[in-house]
Amino acid sequence: MAEQETLEKTQEASPESNKRKVKKSVRIAQMKEEKRERREQMAGFRGAVKAHLKNVPTSPRKMRLVADLVRGQKVDRALNILRFEAKVGSSYIEKLLLSAISNWENENEDRKVEDADLYIKEIFIDGGRMLKRLRPAPQGRGHRIRKRSNHITIVIDSLNPVESNEEDTTSENDNPENDN
């Protein structure tokens, strides 16, 4: 019984030892191949599309006010809101939204934007890097000024799901329940 356990352990250990013996370049090639296979499997699935904008020189708090205006809106309405909004961050979010729409078009070449009924699924603002500066203050002191920046991420998706390529081959006449 103990001999069988040791044999099983050595057999289990052998695949792990084989993985260690594979060269790094071969492992990288295998990983790329696996990624390519996953991409081919997911070719029929087209979901939400992301766009990122990093290090926007506006504080996250001010940018979140603009992001809240368009969260959950349809893309056409959101573009109109952003185009006529006076806040500083609206121009950045408008450009990012146009970029996200372009990304969606590249992913879904067979569909039209007008028919897809796109909407903003998610939009969030994260704090970016902070530049620290000193401002002169009375009596030889210096006050620290923090110049904030942010990262914007926007996710758009279609309200109309992608039509599946596989159609139902049974017709109403072939269904045995409808023989009445």
Image: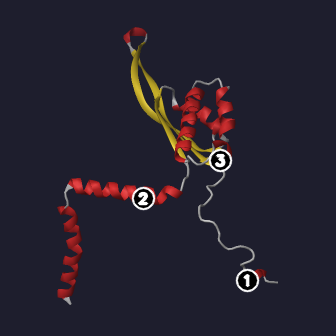
Tell me: 134 left or right of 11: right
Q: Residue furthest right?
A: 180
Q: Which residue is drawn at 73% across and 83% down?
A: 176
x 56%, y 46%: residue = 109
**In-front residue for pair 46/142:** 46
Q: Where is residue 154 in the image (x, y as percent from the top left)?
A: 55, 40
Position of the N terminus by quadrant: bottom left
First in sequence, mark 1 or 3: give its number: 3
Residue 180 in percent (x, y) is at 82, 84
Disc number placed over residue 38 in the picture, else none:
2
Residue shown at the point (75%, 82%) measured from the top left: 177
How many circles with numbers are drawn on the protein? Answer: 3
Residue type indicated by callout 2: Arg
Task: Give the answer, above or below, for where 108 lies relative to 81.
Answer: below
Amino acid bearing label 1: Pro
Extreme bottom residue here? 1
Q: Distance between the residues labelled 1 and 2?
A: 39 Å
Q: Sequence order check: which comes first, mark 3 or mark 2?
A: 2
Q: Is mark 2 on a helix, strand or loop?
A: helix
Residue type, numbered disc 3: Ala
Q: How many angstroms separate mark 3 from mark 2 (CA)?
A: 25 Å
In the rendering, which numbered label is found on residue 116? 3
Q: Which of 57 and 20 is in front in this view?
A: 20
Which residue matches tag 1? 176
- Which residue lies at the image location 42% right of the left edge and 28% below the top edge? 130
